[in-house]
Amino acid sequence: MLKDLLNGFMTQKEILAYYNANVSYKELPKWINGFVFNYKGINNIIINKNLSYYKRKNTIIHELAHIELNQLNRVDRVFETSINKYEDEADRYIKFLLN
Ligand SMILES: [Zn+2]
């Protein structure tokens, strides 16, 4: 699914609908690009509103990778930047899809 977005076969809107996800832009500490959590079946992606357009897009893709890898119930995602194992996994997955 994320592969279809990266290849341009699916729009961001379509993939968000597929994963029952929504994106909100919030004031966050500058070391947090974004995070994702599941609440009552909805995947809530929170993005730092101070990011550039390009970084916002990349962060949404990164958070969608967490959803697609089904990592949300394994750890508390709120301070996800400190959970390096899962961060690496999400980034490696995106690299894999781009190859
Ligand atoms: Zn992450």
Image (cartoon, rainbow, N blue to C red):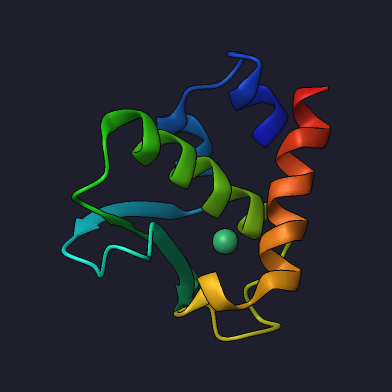
Q: Quadrant of residue 1?
A: top right
Q: In screen coordinates, is 94 left or right of 45?
A: right
Figure disc tally: 0
Ligand 1 is found in which quarter of the picture? Answer: bottom right
**Residue 19 at least partly seen:** no
Q: Quadrant of residue 55?
A: top left
Q: Specify the quadrant that holds the C terminus.
A: top right
Q: Residue at x 68, y 71 (%)?
A: 84
- Residue 71 position in % (x across, y down): 70, 70
Q: Residue at x 25, y 55 (%)?
A: 24
Residue found 62% across the figure and 73% down from its top: 72
Residue that sits furthest to the top in the current view: 8
Rendering coords of residue 77 (x, y %): 53, 77
Depicted 85 relative to depicted 49: above or below: below
Q: Residue furthest front?
A: 31
Q: Is residue 34 above or below residue 10?
A: below
State the residue at coordinates (66%, 35%): 2
Q: 47 and 30: which one is in front?
A: 30
Q: Is residue 11 left or right of residue 69?
A: left
The picture places residue 57, in percent across and down from the top left corner, at 41, 34
Q: Is residue 11 above or below residue 89?
A: above
Residue 57 in sight from this viewpoint: yes
Question: How far across and down, in percent of the image, does residue 19 sit?
Answer: 55, 50
The one of 76 and 43 positioned closer to us in this rendering: 76
